Image (cartoon, helix red, strand yellow):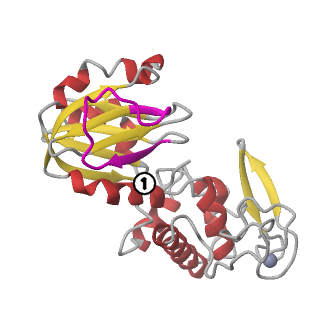
């Protein structure tokens, strides 16, 4: 699932569309098999001929501001955008078989939302108030982990809320109420960097550990953003074609040696989500 760093990178690529007028919006036939897209067909007419004034990321959402109308875009499990420069022809052409939403802008740029698993959304609201009323979780989004100045104090405050403080960190960290842009993959990497066991709860953390956790969030997300998803410090070239290049410390590496101490990496599953960790470097409390 795309997390903050991936969405921020997509946003960077799409920024070229800011201050450009939308010519046409269309949904592909494969999008219309899904109720969430189908019900947007008429509403999408509202943003036609409007200028994209701002492309804003809020946690794992991208909000396309067509003047005062927000289009709330969630990437679901597999969503992403591609940009075709100087695209010619009508907006109905399908560049990819997973294309769902096609935005044709004046000047010839075309943005295509591809969503293989069909869990994404692109929904147009009448106003910000309308959007917040219909999607209440937007009102309770926690901090952005990927930002220039990590808000450590606010992070600690959110971590200490009754809804999160007694939960294992593996769960609390992926709650959008605490940090809005961390998902399952970077969570494991962050806990490894912070040397904290995923079953530890916020109430068990010392203030030093809380600061270490904040620094790990900032470091992992920033590195992933700058290096296209890579979270480790030095990426080694593979010595043979069969050997995969390591891009993560622990994520997806059950049974393989910990990059720090050599112990076998373990995985535990909680609420159907996997967390990878080193039992020696990340000792339980
Ligand atoms: Zn280790």
Q: How many numbered markers are drawn?
A: 1
Disc 1 is placed on an element classified as helix
Vertical arrangement, residue 104 with respect to residue 188, above or below: above
Q: Which residue occupies the extreme front position in the image?
A: 88
Residue at the (39%, 71%) spot, across then down: 151
Q: Which picture quadrant has residue 51?
A: top left
Q: Is mark 1 within 8 Å of ligand 1?
A: no
Left or right, 170 with respect to 92, comes to right
Locate residue 48, reporting x and y percent.
Answer: 16, 30
Q: Is residue 82 magenta?
A: yes
Vertical arrangement, residue 67 with respect to residue 190, above or below: above
Depth order, front residue of 56/172 = 56
Task: Give the image quadrant in which the ligand numbered 1 is located.
Answer: bottom right
Left or right, 81 with respect to 268, comes to left
Depth order, front residue of 203/58 = 58
Determine if residue 38 is in view. yes
Depth order, front residue of 92/178 = 92
Vertical arrangement, residue 225 with respect to residue 206, above or below: above
Determine if residue 179 is in view. no
Magenta residues, start to end: 79-100
Q: Which picture quadrant has residue 124?
A: top left
Vertical arrangement, residue 111 with respect to residue 252, above or below: above
Q: Is residue 272 magenta?
A: no
Quadrant of the snapshot with the C terminus: bottom right
Q: Which picture quadrant has residue 282?
A: bottom right
Task: Tell me which secondary structure the magenta stretch mostly adopts.
Answer: loop
- Which residue position is annotated with label 1? 7
Residue at the (65%, 69%) spot, across then down: 247
Left or right, 90 with respect to 74, comes to left
């Amino acid at each position: 699932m795309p997390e903050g760093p991936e969405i921020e990178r997509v946003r960077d690529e799409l920024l070229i569309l800011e201050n450009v007028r939308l010519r046409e919006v269309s949904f592909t036939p494969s999008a219309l098999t899904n109720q969430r897209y189908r019900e947007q067909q008429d509403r999408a007419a509202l943003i036609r001929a409007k200028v994209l004034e701002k492309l804003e990321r809020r946690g794992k959402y991208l909000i396309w501001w067509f003047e005062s109308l927000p289009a709330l875009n969630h990437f679901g499990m597999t969503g992403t955008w591609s940009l075709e420069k100087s695209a010619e022809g009508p907006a109905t052409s399908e560049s990819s078989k997973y294309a769902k939403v096609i935005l044709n802008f004046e000047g010839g740029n075309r943005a295509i939302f591809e969503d293989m698993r069909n869990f994404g959304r692109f929904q147009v609201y009448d106003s910000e108030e309308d959007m917040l009323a219909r999607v209440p979780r937007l009102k309770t989004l926690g901090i952005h982990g990927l930002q220039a100045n990590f808000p450590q104090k606010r992070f600690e405050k959110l971590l200490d809320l009754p809804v999160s403080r007694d939960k294992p960190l593996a769960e609390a960290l992926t709650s959008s109420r605490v940090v809005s842009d961390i998902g399952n993959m970077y969570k494991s990497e962050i806990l490894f960097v912070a040397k904290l066991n995923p079953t530890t709860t916020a109430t068990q953390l010392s203030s030093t550990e809380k600061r270490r956790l904040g620094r790990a969030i900032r470091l992992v997300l920033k590195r992933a953003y700058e290096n296209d998803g890579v979270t480790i410090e030095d990426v080694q070239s593979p010595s043979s074609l069969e050997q995969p290049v390591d891009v993560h410390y622990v994520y997806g590496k059950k049974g393989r040696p910990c990059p720090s101490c050599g112990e076998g990496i373990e995985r535990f599953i909680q609420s159907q989500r996997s967390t990878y960790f080193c039992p020696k470097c990340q000792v339980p409390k």
